[in-house]
Amino acid sequence: MYNVLLVSIASFFDSTGEIPFMFKRAGCNVDVFCNKTSWLLTNRYHDNWIESSEDHETFKNQLLKLVEDKPDHYDWIVPLEDITIKLMNESIESEAIFKKILPINKIENRDILSSKAGLSSVCEKYGIATPRYINYSEVMDIEVIKQKLDFPILLKEDFSFSGIGIQYCEDASKLQECLDKVRVKTNLVLQEFIKGEDIGLEALFRDGELITYNTGEVLNYMYDKFSFTTRRKYYQDVDIAGLLRTLGKNVGLNSFASIQYVYHPERKTYYLIEVDARTNSWMPYSRFTGYDFSDGIRRIMNNDLTYIETGTTPVDKRVEVAIFDRDIRRCIKHKDFKGMLPWIFNTGGYWKFIPLYDRKISRRVFKKLMKDFLKIRNNT
């Protein structure tokens, strides 16, 4: 049996709820390491629950002890969110333990993990196209910034996710105002804003090799373009596949990754914006795109690291996918009544995106949706 350990410390992240289903469909034995309130427990597709502490230091020590006591038991350990990855990356010194737990196999590139500054540095190291940037210092003069960067720019806190910790600055006159909004200025990155096509994608790597991926044209954001997305159209692209294969080998990506590019049509360049070496909410929905991550997991289980270019959906076809509770909340919040119609009338088969396959997770999703609906109603 192929044993997998899914690890989560952030109980408030709902994105972990459907991840065990993806592994179970691949035929894995699935253990989860989390606290009792975690979304990671809200499903019927894990075999064993190992209870963890909510305290970060204790959690770290518990996980390390678990791995050290059973060094050969788990074939794959998957930390599921940035907070867990950051905690373990800051704690692990042994290269062997690093490769066992963390989602890259090149310890020299560990700065890329949950760090905006680290990503920019690694891109520069390997000649990967990314927007021009500088590392901000509070002694830095605004005139110096204007000489090095063209506005508009983004101010990116080093550790941030879901669009939190990013400020958009239109011109230099607004820079100080934007800086005042930044919560943590340590390792703050100032980065040129590239106007182009936003491309969000999910990928699976093993030992630096690309196993499978899905590219998504963003249809709807929850708030603005720096927030999380609720609808996408998925497709395959030979140029993006080439970029991912190079990225995986250079960085040593060794698990799942949520990646963002911006394509500049005039320059015909894909700029790498984000690499979060973790799972996200979209990955279990790859079963609807024709390029299923569960199939990729099966290949890894069989030690087959061959990248397969063809799936069950033609390469030139775009497949619309939506995340049920996110998109319903977006429609309600923004009074997008037209956007509600597919959910009401099952247009395009939208009902298949409702997680009714698992009563346990569907109950919690509907409960959260109702809570959010009442909050939105009380605030209007």
Image (cartoon, helix red, strand yellow):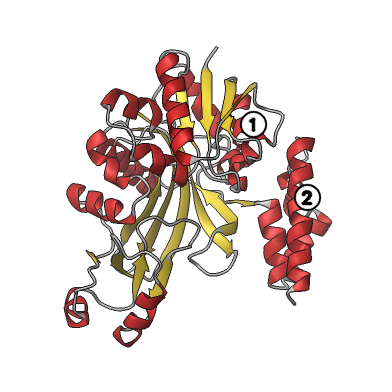
Q: Foreground residue, 148 or 144? A: 144
Judge whether residue 169 can be spotted in this image: no
Q: Quadrant of residue 325?
A: bottom right
Above or below, 280 relative to 164:
above
Q: Residues within 10 Å of mark 1 (few under 14, many from 20)?
A: many
Check the image and name the residue furthest to the bottom: 173
Q: Which residue is mark 2?
A: 366
Instruction: Identify the secondary structure beneath mark 2.
Output: helix
Measured as percent of width and height from the top left, residue 18 is found at 64, 38
Return the residue nearer the eye: 35 or 250.
35
How packed mark 2 is, by other alpha carbons closer than 10 Å (few <14, some 14-19, many 20 or more), is some
Q: Amino acid at mark 1?
A: Phe
The residue identified by callout 1 is 21
Disc tally is 2
Rendered position, 173 above or below 308: below
- Residue in the foreground of this view, choosing between 13 and 328: 13
